[in-house]
Amino acid sequence: LVLYDFDQFFEALEEWDLLNEAKVIILGDFNVPKFMLNDESDGKTRTLKNCMSFFNLIQCNRILNVSGRLLDLVMSNVDCTVERDCLPMIQIDEHHPAISVKLTNIILQEKPFSSGENSKVYNFRTADFV
């Protein structure tokens, strides 16, 4: 992601009011090599740190690749453990280690989907996106 897209992604997250009181986990390869260095002069690092502060998230992944880089970020405000995956689904690439994320003390609640007269419903089977 270029910095503009990166900023837009996190700004969109901050606009979702429902996330303010929610249990949140954000994970992925955000391509922020200076994150581990806490380099606040780097725009992506600064944006990421601001978002983490906004949602009270901590970075849970400490698994480095062979070059000593942290590729996958696991940011959460719930208890989680990140470990090397000992049974990966594909062959391990030493530059992209497989990880396993375990969430503890979390109860998922299913929320009913409302489809009233004024709500849009997407038909994913026909790709009928309004």
Image: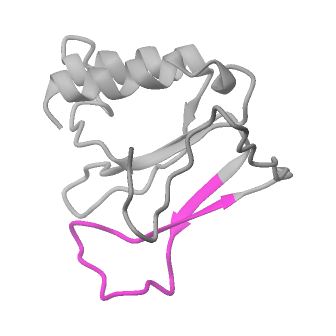
Q: Is residue 110 left or right of residue 13?
A: right
Q: Quadrant of residue 3?
A: top left
Residue shown at 48% from the left, 25% from the top: 13
| 41 falls in the magenta region | no
Residue shown at 81% from the left, 47% from the top: 111
- Quarter of the C terminus within the rendering: top left
Q: Quadrant of residue 50?
A: top left
| Span of residues in magenta | 81-102
Q: Residue furthest left?
A: 2
Q: How are the colours assigned in the image?
A: one colour
Q: Residue 15: x and y, percent? A: 51, 16
| 98 falls in the magenta region | yes
Q: Residue 35: x and y, percent? A: 30, 31
- Quarter of the N terminus within the rendering: top left
Q: Which residue occupies the foreground of this view, 39 or 76?
A: 76
Residue shown at 34% from the left, 56% from the top: 64
From what the image shows, is residue 129 above or below residue 55?
A: below
Magenta segment, prevailing SS (helix, strand or loop): loop
Q: Is residue 104 left or right of residue 87?
A: right
Q: Residue furthest front?
A: 117
Q: Which residue occupies the foreground of this view, 38 or 113?
A: 113
